[in-house]
Image: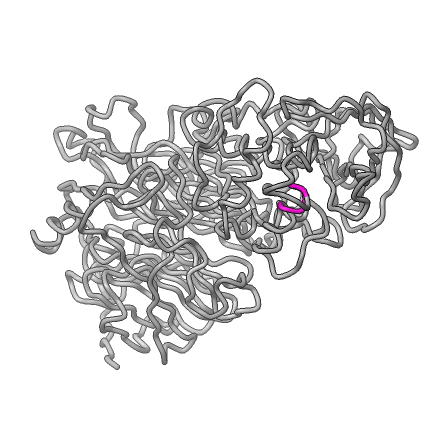
Amino acid sequence: MAAIALSGAGVIAGGSAAQAAGATVDGRLETVAAAGVADWTGWHVDAMASANASPVSETDVAPDGTFTIAQPQPPTNGVSYILAVAPPDPARPSAARATMAAVLTAGGAVVVNERTTVAMAWAMAQFVSNTGVDGAAPGLQNSAAMSQNVADSATGAESSVLASSPNGSETSTEAEFNTLTAAMASCVSAPFADQRDYPDGTCAGILSAGSAADKAAPSDTLRALSAIARNPGIEPASLYGIAQQAPLEGNPPVLGSAPDAWTLALRFDGDGQSLAGPGNFAIDYKGDVWVINNYQFNADVNTPVCGSDKIFEFSPTGQMTTYTGGGLSGAGYGVQIDVHTGNVWVSNFGFAAPAPGCPTDQQPPHNSLSLFAPNGTALSPATGFTQGGINWPQGLAIDANNSVWTANCNNGTVTQVPGGAPANATAFQVFGQDDQPFDVVDNHHSLFVSAINGNAVDLLNYDGTVEKSLTGSDFNNPMGLAAAPDGTVWVSNSGVITLPCPTRPTAEDTAAFDAALQVQFDASGHPTGDPFPQGSVAAISPDGSTVSQYAGGGITIPWGMAVDGKGNAWIANFAGKRLSAFCGTDTSGCPKQAPATGDPISPDTTGYFFDGLTRNTGVAIDQSGNVWLTNNWLEVPIQTNPGGHQIVAYLGLAAPTSVPKPDASVTPVTPTTPATSEPTLADSGSNVVPLLAIALLALLAGGSMVIRRRERLHG
């Protein structure tokens, strides 16, 4: 595997050309502490390769902090890194001491300091353990590459991605990162400076904070920081107190108080002029993030906009490629990747400002699916695939039989594209006319479909017949669905949302939604008044026989739903700028503060708050454990141009997922007259989180459909 491309450097991965025989790395230890370190004598450096607990090579550090060490050669699909360990304190030889770290890049030089340590600890949190660094491809390499978006291992400096728009001074991440480096700097530069508050030293304090966050006691400060990154809401004040012990060189921005959780999140906006209402994600086998887009971009929020004709592919480190064509027209929430072919399916809801804002002749038709090859070539015609009575489609799923399903919000139907062949597409009447089907998911037992206004989730057989209809108080405006590895289906209950498909069912629905948007939160995510819109999540057993409802975790108008590699549920919230998480059915994969299924993992009042979020719809988890959210709507939206302009990644927070490599022997669907387009690449030092926008718009429906009706079962 070639070195992973980054701005300025590449991570040294297994098989990299940078690993020439006899190659060496020239390095230097530094500290960000204002007091500095006058003499690095006694510090020891290990060159490490993933999947190895023992060093590949090692050396002592010169008094000025410099060292030269043999270049480690990681295994295939592995990475290499440096560990730097402080000498024992002569007066306290058994006391905890500092361990710093840095990912090795292909430039042949490395600076190891608190910035590179925190960057590695958070970006690679899911792969760092007491036994070393290890994990599956491509998540491991991608996480090492993402660390360079936080701190540059070649220079030890803060990355330009973190330092500049749409990050930098625009969000709290830079200040939170600096605060974390200050905690580590106290351990590096003067661990015993405060004998009253930290009699065992601040390094021991970091280890204690890591032990509180994890089920296993961390062996050093790097592992302790990674434990905090994986479970960041446990006793955050303790680490903040340690950070106050070490003023930083240059007085960079730091937090003025302890956060509710030590999450690090980065925003990405691609080229800065394309993302407008990103609706949802699909992750491919390389870890690339495919993003659908509601609207055409216009930075002037007072200018009405039409529907987007673009789909974006973001690399694991945030570079954006744009594709057009294939009938894309204001896509909303529906996007999935066919794991057999790698093809990307999109449902075109048809978001746009009403005429005359978006002229009548440019209004989207609300009746199609689009299809793209893995290289971005449009495989659907310029009109999209319109067979099967598609009608204001939202969520989309691909079942175990390779059939594509989409929920038609306008008329209570679900469209099936058998085997991915549009000519055979059929619509099934599943819900009532005004029930607003929203999302669909396959748990390999049945298809599950949520109905927002119907307050129901139906189980469908793979022939489109209704197997079971679930209603009752466990469902309250249900929206996003996600299937766990054991077949449990998680549901987000927004509590207030209905959609304009093209109109909302009643005036009361619009009033409740509008009232929810008026709720205010302070700068830390705490609600400042009533009513406080919350919502809930529900877990449905694989066969639909039981439903359990859960609340807490900071939920505020939950929308999108995703499940991580351990089966825990992650929720995008449309209000309150927070991410929520709940313990799944396999409780062995839950942190110790959430020992039972449905226990909140995220803090109850704020969730995992981030001031760089706006209003979020889509959520996805990649192979590195990054949790991606779409900034779908602006915080204060203008209804004719409400779209947000970023996607957001919470680094290393969830258990990594896996995506199989496509089977090259499967022939992709190819229309008679495909519409193709040339991709464009935007180098993104700041990037994007898009998801579907709820438009309070009057949109015009068009077209007719033939529906093969199925009797709806109750029970």
Q: Is residue 703 visible?
A: no
Position of residue 561 measured from the top left corner of the image (x, y, whole percent): 39, 56
Question: Which quadrant of the figure contains the C terminus?
Answer: bottom left
User: What is the count of numbered marks?
Assistant: 0
In this rendering, is residue 279 above or below 558? above
Position of residue 289 measured from the top left corner of the image (x, y, whole percent): 50, 42
Q: Relative to the observer, which residue lies in front, 338 or 265?
A: 265
- Residue stretch rendered in magenta on the structure: 201-205
Q: Main secondary structure of the magenta part?
A: helix
Identify the residue shown where x is 47% and y is 59%. 563
Identify the residue shown where x is 54% and y is 38%. 375
Q: Residue furthest left?
A: 507
Position of residue 189 measured from the top left corner of the image (x, y, whole percent): 69, 30
Position of residue 372 measured from the top left corner of the image (x, y, whole percent): 46, 43
Question: Which quadrant of the figure contains the N terminus?
Answer: top right
Q: Is residue 339 visible?
A: yes
Q: Magenta includes 204?
A: yes
In this rendering, is residue 466 above or below 180? below
Identify the residue shown where x is 61% and y is 61%. 215
